[in-house]
Structure formats: structure tokens, C-alpha cells
Amino acid sequence: MTPAQCRAGRALIEWTIEDLAEASGVAASVITDFETRRTQVDREAIEALVAAFEHGGVRLIPENGGGEGVRLKFSRSEVKRIATLEGEGGIIAEDDV
């Protein structure tokens, strides 16, 4: 994941840095430093950010000749519905089934 993908992923699902920090367990200051390229972030933090985005409905697209990017794994309404169900103790399943 690149800093640009991190910023774009947050924008897609309307997460603040604090939202991403809470979802990933990575400090907000570390996320800010990563997004602004102030410091290099360790692999574990990147993996936690990627996992949080995937859980939040963002799919990271690697460089594949067409350029890296991000896209929604689900529509916004599906993401909100999944979050509601999970928050209410609803059905829990793998997202990629």
C-alpha cells in the first residue's frame, strides 16, 4: 500500500485518520506520517492498515500496468449495512465467499 492509496481508501469510505487508527490499531500520528511520507512505517503497521481497509470495504489494487489504486469492495450501502449487522451481533462471515 502506498501513501496515496491510504488517503484514497479513507476518502472512499469517508474515514478520518482517527477512524482508520481505531479500526487498525495503528496510532493516528503514524498514519499521518505515512500519508505525508514524513517517516517510513514498519511492515506490521502497513499490514494492519490493509486489513482495516479490507474489513471496511476497500480493495487495494496493485500496480498492474494500469496503475495502482483503490476501489470499493462493496457498494456504500452494503458497507454500511455490513457494519450495522456486525455492530448488532448479526451474521458474521467471510467477505470473499
Image: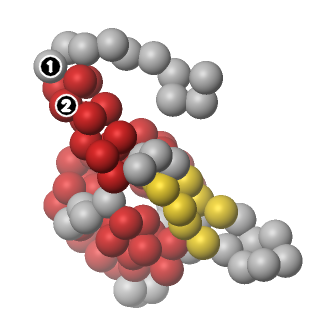
The amino acid beneath tag 1 is Glu
Asked if residue 61 lies left or right of residue 74, the reply is right
From the top left corner, tell me how far across and down residue 9 is, in percent. 42, 65
Q: Point out residue 46 in the picture as x, y percentages from the top left corner.
A: 50, 57
Look at 32% across and 60% down and name the residue there.
Answer: 13
Residue to which mark 2 is pinned = 84
Q: Report helix, strand or loop for mark 1.
A: loop
Instruction: Kindly identify the residue that appears in the image at 65 percent across and 63 percent down.
Output: 61
Q: Is residue 43 left or right of residue 53?
A: right
Residue 32: image location, x then y, percent: 30, 76
82 versus 10 height, above or below: above
Categorize mark 1 by other alpha carbons within 10 Å: few (<14), some (14-19), many (20+). few
Q: Residue at x 33, y 71 (%)?
A: 11
If the image is split into quadrants, where does the C terminus sit? top right
Q: Relative to residue 33, is residue 49 depicted above or below? A: above
Proximity of marks 2 and 1: CB atoms separated by less than 8 Å: yes
The relative height of residue 72 versus residue 94 in the rendered view (above or below) is: below
